[in-house]
Image (cartoon, rainbow, N blue to C red):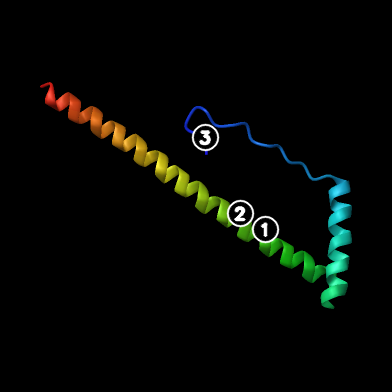
Amino acid sequence: MGTLGSQPERNKYRAGSESLGYFLEDAAELAKKHKISIEAVISAKHALELERQNNIAVQNGDYTDEQAGGIGEILSRIAAALESNV
């Protein structure tokens, strides 16, 4: 994890028509394998994507809490140093 001010650049992802073609081919294979409709496969994929997004949000919250805690610790040390000099 990068620290504030030194985070690595994020990868840029783009899904084009080629990706869609691969996805639909995979969806058709899964539908046949599990004897369900392609729509059911797409719905399941959507559910997995929602779970992935939730996991990312939770992880982001953990990182934010960690960084806020670090900043709070620094501010506490600064306040203590200032108080001891008064």
Mark 3 sits on what residue?
A: 2
Contact between labelled residues 1 and 2, with CB atoms less than 8 Å apart? yes
Badge 3: few (under 14), some or many (20 or more) residues near its Cα, within 10 Å?
A: few
Residue for point 89% across, 53% down: 21
Report the residue that reaches farthest toward the left.
Answer: 86
Task: Answer above or below: position of 47 versus 67.
Answer: below
| Among the two numbered marks 3 and 2 on one chain, the one whose residue lies closer to the N terminus | 3
Mark 2 sits on what residue?
A: 53
On the image, the x and y values in percent for residue 38 come to 84, 69
Label 3, secondary structure: give it. Answer: loop
Label 1, secondary structure: give it. Answer: helix
Residue 72, picture quadrant: top left
Residue 49 marker: 1
On the image, the x and y values in percent for residue 12 come to 71, 37
Q: Is residue 52 left or right of residue 18?
A: left
Q: Amino acid at mark 1?
A: Glu
